[in-house]
Image (tube, helix red, strand yellow):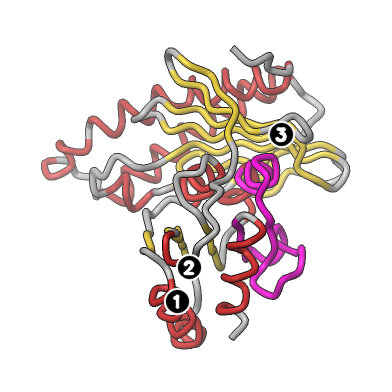
Amino acid sequence: MANRPAHINIMVKAVMASAKSLVRDFGELENLQVSKKGPKDFVTAADVRSEETLKYHLGEAYPDYGFLAEEGGDEIDGKESYWIIDPLDGTLNFMHGFPHFAINVALYQKGEIVAGVTYDPILDELFWATKGQGLFLSQPRSDRRLRVANRRKLEESILIKGHHITPERRSELMGRIQSLQSEMAGIRQTGSSALNLAYFAAGRFDGLWLEGQSKWDIAPGLLFAKEAGAIVTDMNGKFDMFESGSIVAANDTIHHKMMKIIKG
């Protein structure tokens, strides 16, 4: 078992507690047809419960830290340290009974992400990283360090993508995606940006391209990709990923080849 820092242990405690309610709610989806609530209301309630649990455990351990959360908004004024929370990433998957969603927590200190946790409660996979210490995957009977995939040929590589964009930009980006698809072995889209980043950093995909992402979608995953040895930029080749919500990541060779196509 890798030696986890104290703040990671608190984050893990929080996501595990949150996961219990999410898994329970996920098991209730089959009853929605006879419920007065619609699926959207049900999922919103599940989001809120999950976020409240995360805030309770994190706030109890670090009462001076702020929160930037998807459901609860911005509580970071004057805070040098704050938690970035997505209590349910992959909401549409969750609503449709598709078991691919995650809980995201990152710690932001002095202008950078210093720790992150992404937990898939269905597969019981816990991805976690601390700045400068590498990326790890904890499963029930194993705990191992992860590295980005090392394939060097674009035609053998799989891209994972996720684009939340305006209709005005859709045609522009679709042409670039089709160009990538013609050069690569395949392109996948799973419906969870958190797991897209975690899976990419774990070497399950060779390249990643996300657009239009919120901070809580990508905060842990940005750290994961860097700690796993990836080259990480925005789609313009710059390093404004966190603010722009745009991420292109791969090993050095694949990243260079992808960027030539993405930049047209």
Contact? badges 2 and 3 (CB < 8 Å): no
| Residue at the image point whose x is 43% and y is 50% from the top | 192
Q: Residues within 10 Å of mark 3 (few under 14, many from 20)?
A: many
Q: Which residue is mark 3?
A: 115
Which element type, helix, strand or loop, lies under badge 2?
strand
Q: Nearer the viewer, residue 43 or 232?
A: 232
Q: Is residue 108 visible?
A: yes
Contact? badges 1 and 2 (CB < 8 Å): yes
In the picture, the disc for residue 163 is: 2
| Residue at the image point whose x is 58% and y is 33% from the top | 146
What amino acid is at disc 3?
Answer: Ala
Which element type, helix, strand or loop, lies under badge 1?
helix
Q: Nearer the viewer, residue 220 or 42?
A: 220
| Residue at the image point whose x is 34% and y is 30% from the top | 122
| Residue at the image point whose x is 82% and y is 36% from the top | 81
Tell me if residue 230 is in the magenta stretch: yes
Residue 206 % position (x, y): 50, 54
Q: Quadrant of the N terminus?
A: top right
In the picture, the disc for residue 177 is: 1
Point out the stretch of residues depicted in magenta. Answer: 221-250
What amino acid is at disc 2?
Answer: His
